[in-house]
Image (cartoon, grey):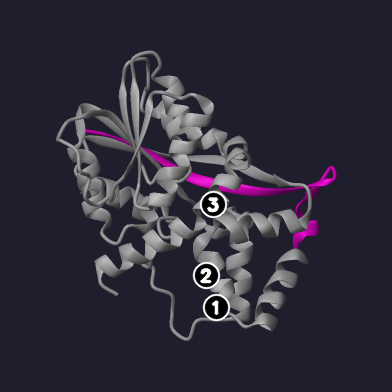
Amino acid sequence: MTAEELKEQQRNLWGAAAPAWERWDTFQEVHARPVNEWLCRSTSLTAGKTVLDLACGSGEPSFTAAQFVRPGGKVIATDIAPEMVEAVRRRAAADGVDNVEARVMDIEHIDLPDATFDAVTCRWGYMFCPDLRRALDESQRVLRVGGRLSLAVWSLPAENPWLGTFVNVLNQVAPSPTPPDPNALGPFRLADRARLDDLLRRAGFADHSIDTVNFSFDFDSPEQWWEFVFDIAAPIRTRILSLDESGQERVKQLVLAQADVFESQGKLRLPAQNLCAVASK
């Protein structure tokens, strides 16, 4: 595929997932709060600052940032999928949040002036950019001198069994006939700390650092775990639906068979880990 075809694929993929993201919004916000707060604190957000949130999904960390910059501050939440942007607008209206503005925007072509923002945030977005260098260049361009970019990406599959289990099972049930492309768009594309470090170094920021942020997704049942991942992890859902009915059922049963490993006090606690980086202009 060309870069534009990949973008259109991503737009459609995440647009179709938007209703599920909106439905699971509170659940995700509660469990991923350590990441949302890390992104906001690492950029030193305070009252009056302006923030650009890229690949905002259904609204995080946009809404967390909006609390940090009150009074007088503003967040522009952007996503390539119009359906995600509409979800953010609905939440802002429902919650009475007046300092979040949602816009449809391509992370590689930010339609905003140079040196506009004190901070740029991006949670779980850069992994899906066809041109990572351009996305980072654009992020740097719209930052004021001294401003900070803060981003979160998924660490290695082994550190994220909430999703890595699905990937492993899919690879078992429907193995790829060719070796995986390490640059293919996907949730674990930037899971290698050394690769992320090199990417930020080459992007020309004044300095950067990378931390590890651990959290977990807690589920009431194995079925809730399955439903959550199937709903919100659009690339995984696409792979599952590409199988015939018996293949889909086999994937589900193999995933659910591993649930007992994560049982804790009547719930399932699925570990999750992000690499979180902050870079200064």
Taking the spot 38% from the left edge, 46% from the top edge, the residue there is 55
Instruction: Name which residue type carries label 2.
Output: Thr
Mark seen at residue 19:
3
Q: Which residue is mark 2?
A: 238
Residue 273: image x %, image y %?
55, 47
Instruction: Name which residue type carries label 1.
Output: Ser
Residue 124: image x %, image y %?
44, 48
Sequence-wise first label, 2 or 3: 3
Q: Are marks 1 and 3 in contact (CB under 8 Å)?
A: no
Q: Are marks 1 and 2 in contact (CB under 8 Å)?
A: yes
Outermost residue to the bottom: 177
Q: Is residue 275 above or below residue 245?
A: above
Q: Residue 113, located in which quarter of the rendered image? A: top left
Q: Quadrant of the N terminus?
A: bottom left
Sequence-wise first label, 1 or 3: 3
Q: Secondary structure at mark 3?
A: helix
Q: Characterize the magenta stretch by its predominant secondary structure.
A: strand
Disc 1 residue crowd, few under 14, some 14–19, many 20+, Cα 10 Å: few
Mark 1 → mark 2, Cα distance in angstroms? 6 Å
Mark seen at residue 242:
1
Q: Is residue 149 above or below residue 241?
A: above
Residue 239: image x %, image y %?
54, 72
Q: Is residue 140 above or below residue 271?
A: above
Taking the spot 61% from the left edge, 46% from the top edge, the residue there is 24
Q: Which residues are magenta?
A: 258-281
180 left or right of 95?
left
Taking the spot 38% from the left edge, 50% from the top edge, the residue there is 82
